[in-house]
Image (tube, grey):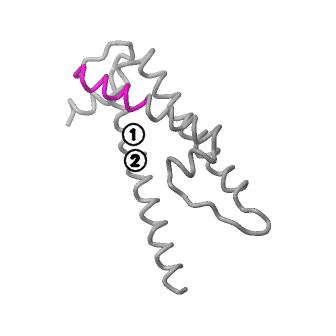
Amino acid sequence: MVNFLNKIFPENVNNNYSGNRIALWAFIIFLALMTWRSVIHMFFEPFGMHNIANIVVLTGDPDPMPLIYRFFSIWGFAQLIFCFACWIAIIKYRSFIPLMYLFVVMWLTIIIQQVRLVFIWLHTFWSYY
């Protein structure tokens, strides 16, 4: 347990990564994909929402899509902030990469739980109609 904590929270913060090279390159590839996805969600909301997330276009009066696009843009910005912190760890503080892996796992766990709750809510909502 102590060795695990020493890997997550190193005593000396530097640019020396003592882990597996494959894990480092997998993290860089994953982060590049996440950064690309974040930029698409932030700046190209309709494409990110309909082509990547496969969400249908809603119609109505007034049109609800500009507000929904804005929320997707904010979501892309939040992802971009997280990616920025991870890129700083890769470029300058590689000893923090195990901590960044922990953050990614926690972040993905939260996302999966949120999506699960949305699907439960949608199932409950649509079952009445």
Percent coordinates x, y for residue 57 in the rendering: 62, 60
As rendered, which of 108 and 44 lies closer to the eye?
44
Q: Amino acid at mark 1?
A: Val
Q: Amino acid at mark 2?
A: Leu
Identify which residue is drawn at 55% across, 86% down: 129
Report, in whole angstroms, how far the alpha carbon at label 1 lies from the one at label 2. 6 Å
What residue sits right under mark 2 in the picture?
A: 108
Quadrant (top left, top right, bottom left, bottom right) of the N terminus: top left
Residue contact at pointers 1 and 2, CB within 8 angstroms: yes
Residue 28 lies in the magenta stretch: yes
Q: Which residues are magenta?
A: 20-31
Q: Residues within 10 Å of mark 2 (few under 14, many from 20)?
A: few
Residue farthest to the bottom, as pictured: 128
Q: Position of residue 16 (x, y in %)?
A: 32, 13
Pinpoint residue 19: horizontal percent, then vertical percent.
24, 22
Inspect the magenta stretch and tell me whether residue 112 lies in it.
Answer: no
Q: Is 59 situated above or below 55?
A: below
Residue sitting at x 63%, y 40%: 44
On the image, which quarter does residue 91 sit in? top left
Q: Is residue 70 above or below residue 29?
A: below
- Residue beneath label 1, please? 104
Name the foreground residue: 51 vs 53. Answer: 51
Label 1: few (<14), some (14–19) or many (≥20) C-alpha neighbours in 10 Å: some
Q: Main secondary structure of the magenta part?
A: helix
Horizontal and vertical percent position of residue 125: 53, 79
